[in-house]
Amino acid sequence: MKKTLIILVIIVIAMVGIGGYFASQKYLFPKTQTVGVYSAKPSIKITSPNIGQILIKGSTYNITWESNGLQRTDKIRIILSDILTTPGFINQALQSVSQSSYFLVANLNGDSTSYNWIIPKNINSGNVYKLKIDAYRNSPSTLASDLSEDFSIVDSQ
């Protein structure tokens, strides 16, 4: 009788152990698992104009940039600022557009990498300028931004 009771206890323990193993396989480790997609933080970098470059009023200039992690549905805006009359431009990184700052374009597709800018003839000559480029999604909150190097605009060379 004692021997039968010991065998019965061993069988019950084994069954509970085996049942617990299969239950953990079914609920804790399902056969199909969803793996999340890693998405890097978007970035953007102006590649032209370059430092010290001189642009001519009335001409067309190709502003270029590189980006990572932006979608076609994201939007890009480019802002020009005369840094001699807008000294806070660099420090504030254009939190708001001042009187000496101008939107060049506000709704380019997020997958674009250039913009052909016709430089206005009425822009101040000889001043030092910077561009700021922002990428945003579904709202004005910025995903990524960059400032260009200093460049000048003149009447003609």
Image: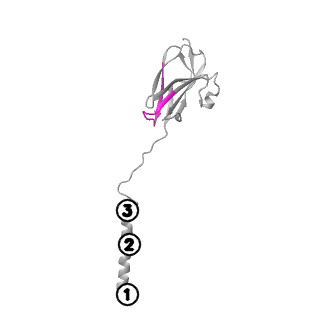
Q: Earlier in the sequence, mark 1 or mark 3?
A: 1
Residue type beneath disc 2: Val
Q: Secondary structure at mark 1?
A: helix
Residue type beneath disc 3: Gln
Q: Secondary structure at mark 3?
A: helix
- The segment highlighted magenta reads 61-77
* Labelled disc at residue 25: 3
Q: Residue 3 appears in which quarter of the rendering? A: bottom left
| Side of 115 relative to 129 (left or right) | left
Query: Residue 51, position in %: x, y?
Result: 56, 24
155 drawn magenta: no
For the residues labelled 1 and 2, the Cα–Cα distance comes to 21 Å
Q: Main secondary structure of the magenta part?
A: strand
Q: Which residue is mark 2?
A: 16
Rate crowding at label 2 as few (under 14), some (14 to 19) or many (20 or more) other CA atoms within 10 Å: few
Rate crowding at label 3 as few (under 14), some (14 to 19) or many (20 or more) other CA atoms within 10 Å: few
